[in-house]
Every structure is written in structure tokens, then in C-alpha cells.
Image: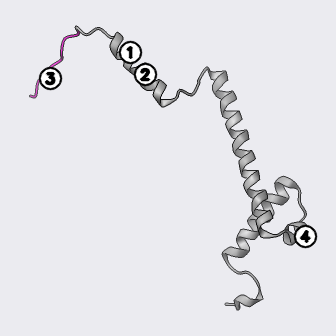
Amino acid sequence: MAPAFFGPTGNIREDFLEEAFLLQYHLKMSYSDIRSMPLPYRRWFIERLAKEFKKEADARKKASDERQGLRDIPMGEMSDMMNKIQQDMPQNTPERKFNNG
């Protein structure tokens, strides 16, 4: 095993390479620019990219749901709808009894 003072090893190197790949692939940054970029800036670009991907995915899901006629219903509204349905159901339905044997 090589001494650690020769540079990053293990997960640190792999983490940097993952970040470099993402920035090169999606933002077309050069490897030398990524290497010289301070760590907080590099992380900011990665987090901002993730935020943008999430926003795009949410927009695609919303468009897909609209095409299918689906919509999000808040839980409070859903509860109100269920209560209304139960109140509108006829109350004179006979009870069902099950035979145990």
C-alpha cells in the first residue's frame, strides 16, 4: 500500500473522479478547470446540477400526469373527500356476518 502523502487515495480520488465526470459530461468543463476549482465551488456546481435535474424530472412527471388526467391531491383534501363519500353512502346496508366454520 502506498503512503497517503503521495496524493489522495481510495474514496477521495474516486469521489473527485465522479465529480469531474459529471462536470465534464453535463457542463463540458475541462479536466484542468475542474482540478483547479476550489472544492466548495465544485460541490456547488454538482448540487446545482442535481437541483436542475430534479426540477426537470418533476416537470416531466407533471406533464405526464396531466396527459393521463392525473393530479396530486393534498392529504387534507383527500381526507375531506373520503369523509364526504362515507357520509353520502346509504346507512341502511345490512351488516354482514361471517360464519366461523
For residue 68, above or below residue 39 = above
Q: Which of the marked residues, 2 or 4, is nearer the chain's N terminus?
A: 4
Residue highlighted by disc 4: 32
Give the vertical position of 38 relative to 46 (above or below): below
| Residue type (three-letter) at the residue carrying disc 2 | Asp
Task: State which quarter of the image contains the N terminus.
Answer: bottom right
Type of amino acid under label 4: Ser
* Among the 4 quarters of the image, the one containing residue 95: top left
Q: Nearer the viewer, mark 2 or mark 3?
A: 2
In the picture, the disc for residue 80 is 2
Left or right, residue 51 beside residue 38? left
Residue 98 inside the magenta-drawn segment:
yes
Relative image position of residue 3 (x, y in whole percent):
70, 91
Q: Earlier in the sequence, mark 3 or mark 1?
A: 1
- Tell me, yes or no, whether the two marked residues, 2 and 4, touch with CB atoms within 8 Å: no
Q: Residue 48 at x, y = what percent?
A: 76, 52
Q: Position of residue 83 (x, y in %)?
A: 37, 20
Mark 1 — residue? 85
The magenta segment: 93-101
